[in-house]
Amino acid sequence: MKQVLFSLFVLFGSISMTFGQMTVSGKVTDSAGEALIGANVTAKGAAGTGTITDIDGMYSLKVPSGTTTLVFSYTGYDTQEVAIGSSNVVNVTMAEGKVLEEIVVTGLGIKKEKKALGYAVTTLSSADIELKPEADVTRVLRGKVPGVNINQTSGLAGSGTNIIIRGYTSISGSNQPLFVVDGVPFGSSTSPDRGALGGNATASSRFLDLDPNNVAEVSVLKGLSATVLYGEAGRNGVILITTKSGTHNNKNDKMSVFVEQGIFVNQIASLPQDQDFYGNGFDNAASGAFSNWGADVRKPGAQGTNLAADGTIAHPYDRAAITAFLPEYKGARYAYKAYDNLQGFYQKGLISNTSVGASARVDKTSINFTFSHRDEEGFVPLSKLKRNNLSLGTNTTLANGLTLTSTFNYVGIDKTAPPAGASTSSNPDGAGASSLFSNVLYVPRSVDLNGLAYELPNHTSIFYRGGNDIQHPLWTINNTRDLEDVNRFFGTIGARFSVTDWLSLNYRLGVDTYSQKNSYQINRGGPQVPDGLMVTSNRTNTIMDHNLNAQFNKSLTESFNLDAVVGVNLRTDNLDRTFTSSTNQFVYGLFAHNNFITHSNSSDKYDEKLLGAFATATLGYKSYLYLNLQGRNDWTSTLEKDNASVFYPSASVSFVPTEAFTGLTNNKVLDYLKLRVGYGTSAGYPDPYRTRSVLSTSTRNFVTGTGTVINTNSVSNFFGNINLKPEIHKELEFGIDAKLFKNLIGLEVSVYNKKSTDLLVNLPLDPSTGYNETAINAANINTSGIELGLTVNAIQKKDVNLSFNANFTTVDNIVEELVDGVDQISIFSIFTTLGSFAIAGQPYGVIQGTKAVRHENGQRLVSSQGLYASDNNLNLLGNPNENYTLNGGFNFSYKGFGLSALVTYQDGGAMFASLPSTLMGRGVLQETDFDRFVPVVAPGVKADGTPNDVQTSSINHYWQNGGVFIDEMRIYDASYWKLREVGVSYKLPSSLLEKTPFGSATITLSGQNLWFKALGFPPGANFDPEVSATGVGNARGFELMNTPTSKTYGGTLRFTF
């Protein structure tokens, strides 16, 4: 393997070098004499030779011998060409003019003028992404792109991220977007070994392998008219990432080096605020109960409390099962008081992020190199992440005009996470699952979590409960591991040959391959998995992508220009997986499968091929009217021959009135206006082997008493459907882009409607058929939405800049139709009575569960004991989809000082939340700090319809009426405010660095998720609704005490040389 990597490194790193011969310098100013910062200066006729002006408007550019003209351009000003003449100093005063045309990256990495596009594209630069505390590049995008919803599965280091662009349009298929890195599809799947109940919230999404500090640019393609060239893979949107190793922007013939060192603090963000006056027990008396409805710690010796006069109770470990091993607890007393459990349990983890990089250009060859190392501690000792990233990119143009490009990227990840099994009440709900956080969060206030011993000499977990049915969190910390090891290589080799000045031929080979090893380890001795468990998996995933195309760009007449691409694409995906599960550990502490008594093994292999032919053509008329026609035909291996070929057409029109009409060209209000409309289509293919029933082979199914091995063959429980068709998606999009008052205000609006039909669904079969499940085309969904983006450049001066930005998103996902005979389809289920469903006429993913029995007048029915009864049928409880999301922020700079912030508001969205309901029901939260002897009257009516006046105790009301027994009582409004990002930076003046080796020096302080307020939850819960406890997938609106969220803050030093 090392030899292969070395060979690839040499191949991708081969370059040739020559030198330039002439330096021109000067200053660029506006008509008022103010320096223009960041103006572009290029040498005409010398491709790739250019620079930008510094903070004083100064530039210095080395140009090839024979260069006679420099080209100066700047946003909002007319481009100027200036002769160099006999002097090497060229000063330029630029005149205000039309807004400089913006160039963006579109499908297949093709760069186009933004005004020519008939669809929405959002582009972020490296400044929006790098130097942040976050390891996951996608989480840095949160709040910055309208129409994109990004939720984390937990606050643990390296946990997964759920990304949804323009809503959910598939029920059983993936709704995650396609990632394309340096022009090549990038495997970004999340591959948990366990389901949501078993703790899949800790599983990583593979875009964790990308280093945010090596990202040069991110473009988000949202609509089908923008993504059609990617075929089926682009149906959920496309996120185009250009790495610094894949760019070649160093226009100077000298080397540039940077060094960055970031140090951040990682701590729990959503820490509940507990009451401090009542301990564990029931009915205001101390006991070893789960709940916190015990005695008042302020009243030692009070009658009926079981408290001694000195405020102590019998030690929870004074029981025979423990004193037989630990006799010191026999007859011991224990202080019944409020202990500092949560603050003492969680830690402040440190994050160290180091990056070094270099770029150089010599003549027509450029090279970029970056290495990064990240060492991250989570907010619990069991959470760690180490990542190494190595990137190299080269670009060279040969004498014959052939341009060769290459990128090489290696990633190594070592991650450790705690078990995060889901819990709706006490212990984990999933079989064989272990959970750290649920057992921590509801520990009664009078139990010393951090002070009580956690195990016997034989390593059996012990805790305060008499039946030893609660696992001590410290035992969990020391006896469980969820490990992940990843090694990944991805890279490209490309060639471009210009046949003429208007025709070029291009070929690119992309390779993305990784191996992922997971190991889930639990020692014997804990009540959650008493006999111990070890589950390992090995995955090898490889994508090979070939793309061959011809690009045509030519002015047909003075008025018409044609920009076209035609090509073919071949993609192969190969996945190999093996699983081994072992139970009944023999020797404590040894994790090897041969140290377990019972084993089960499985392996599978998936191969998928996709061949596509595509074409796109943009006909431009006088730079103000553009017609864009696109199409792609795919042939897939996952459908039968009659359904394997699918054609996706697309068309869009862009009209720029400010270019078309003389009266709008030079007005003082409207600088730029574009009207656009686009129509696009796509499809959705089933996973491999959905159309054929698969034969499984077991070579060691039985072993007789004499040692004879019996092999078996069996047909899988899944019935293959040869009549499966692809899902079909069609979208119509309208938009307006405008800039006003000399680029003071920028506005982008998109309105769209998407129809998704023949959606693939897995449905259960009657076992009498010999199968349990099959796939059919069974549903239609309609998705519509509005996206707004607003930018206000309030101040644009030499030393002071201030801009405000905001975006607004609203999406309406409606399940329009289900196949005859099907009333609803389960998207995710916790129990048979609780889950997320697709129901005709309802929003996508509505939550159903149990609710309180109603009187015929619709109000809750209260029994003679003052309690609600539960209707255990499936009842509609809420819509988890928010009404809208609003993000707003600002960027301010004064000379070398910078300040920025980003705030998010989400309106609506129902959430089933275990944490607040459980802590309220158990009397832990600060909201339960009241006189508990005062009875409660539950809202509702009695059997005769009159208002309820039956009193019940506070424990009965909060535990049974509002605790964990009725799902309806655990549904909350997920509206929230959040301070998503804050950043402060200072760049040292160049005058202070003149006698140092540094070209620049910058210090940046930043923080993420520093403050939030969930409007529909008890304030004491300090709850963060921006979490997806069901893992990466199609269900949303569930929090299951898996893991809390985190906040990070710290600083980065960056030096360039």
Image: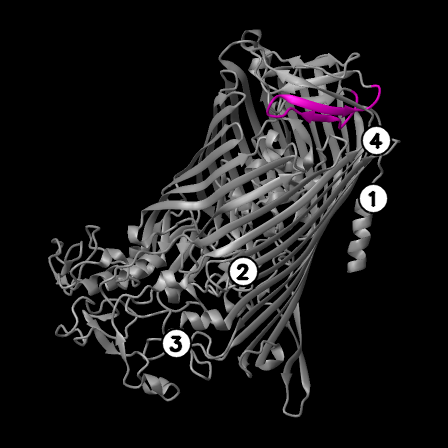
Q: Amino acid at mark 4?
A: Phe
What is the crowding at mark 3: few (fewer than 14 residues within 10 Å), some, or many (at least 20)? some
Q: Amino acid at mark 1?
A: Ser
For residue 807, say whether it is visible.
yes
Residue drawn at x 57%, y 43% is 1053
If you read the primary sequence from the N terminus, does the residue marked by circle 3 or circle 1 appear first? 1
Tally of numbered discs: 4
If you read the primary sequence from the N terminus, does the residue marked by circle 3 or circle 4 appear first? 4
Disc 1 is placed on an element classified as: loop
**Whole-percent x, y for residue 13 in the image:** 80, 45
**Whole-percent x, y for residue 667 in the image:** 52, 9
Residue under pointer 3: 453
If you read the primary sequence from the N terminus, does the residue marked by circle 3 or circle 2 appear first? 2
C-alpha distance separating marks 3 and 1:
61 Å
Task: State yes or no: discs 3 and 1 in contact (Cβ < 8 Å).
Answer: no
Residue under pointer 2: 384
What is the crowding at mark 4: few (fewer than 14 residues within 10 Å), some, or many (at least 20)? some
**Whole-percent x, y for residue 1039 in the image:** 40, 56
Q: Amino acid at mark 2?
A: Lys
Give the magenta-colored segment's residue range. Answer: 45-66
C-alpha distance separating marks 2 and 1:
37 Å
If you read the primary sequence from the N terminus, does the residue marked by circle 2 or circle 4 appear first? 4
